[in-house]
Image: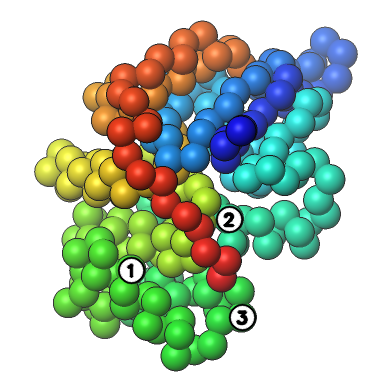
Amino acid sequence: MNDAVIQLDSVSKIYGKGEAEVRALDSVSISIDRGDFVAIIGASGSGKSTMMNIIGCLDGATQGTYHLDGIDTGTLDEFQLAQIRNRKIGFVFQNFNLIPRTRAVDNVSMPLAYAKVHRKERRERALEVLASVGLAERADHKPSQLSGGQQQRVAIARALVTNPVLLLADEPTGALDTKSSHEILDLFESLHANGRTIVMITHETDVAARANRVVRFQDGHIIEDHRLRDVHAHPVATAVPA
């Protein structure tokens, strides 16, 4: 039985034509299982950011197919892709992307509003997930009242509130100091230990080493795919539709 959350088959992303053609991704194939914690690593221009955009349904492949949780994303229109992004993918960004004048609990509940979840349930679920990342007592604080590490925890809580099949993190420690970075990576390890599927984009080898699988990109190709730990050592989280 295939239990892949992510399945890319011969995916290429091509910009320009003729002599100006650039293959940001060149016939990339990869499968990422449910419950895996994968770090995608590479230098600037390696293709890792393009890979993130395709995995996150923010951009489409020029060639090849991408299945997310069994769904062929190449067959979806923009509205359907937006639904996939909101319900199946939890995004974590380097700069948090929180709404400045909005309380933590309301930042976290925002994806549930788009999913048309009732206001009372939105707040209950947001408070629950804030507690799970250690910020129960900061629910009514605005981003300016939180440290960088706390803001990233709010962002992670927001990513988790819809119980997505995939947590997609783009340089999640890039704006943090060393202590906060370790705390965020500890949180990712804890989420993974509870069965969460995580894909983390990074250019830092020490950050990548916290995953259980490292995939290295160079010039649009996968040049290394190395498993550090056994994914089956952990239970698998089951996503619940929003």
The image shows residue 143, relative to residue 30, as above or below, that is below
Q: Residue 88, labelled with which disc?
A: 2
The mark nearer the N terminus, 2 or 3, is 2
Q: Residue at x 30, y 24 (%)?
A: 229
Q: Residue at x 46, y 15 (%)?
A: 225
- Camera-side residue: 127 or 174? 127
Task: Name the residue furthest bottom.
Answer: 120
> Rounded to the nearest whole Å, what is the CA distance between mark 1 and mark 3?
18 Å
- Residue under label 3, please give it: 116
Circle 3: residue type? Lys
**Circle 3 Cα neighbour tier, 10 Å, few/some/many (<14 / 14–19 / ≥20):** few
The image shows residue 36, relative to residue 108, as above or below, that is above
Residue 17 position, x and y percent, is 85, 19
- Camera-side residue: 203 or 12? 12
Q: Residue 129, labelled with which disc?
A: 1
Task: Name the residue furthest left.
Answer: 179
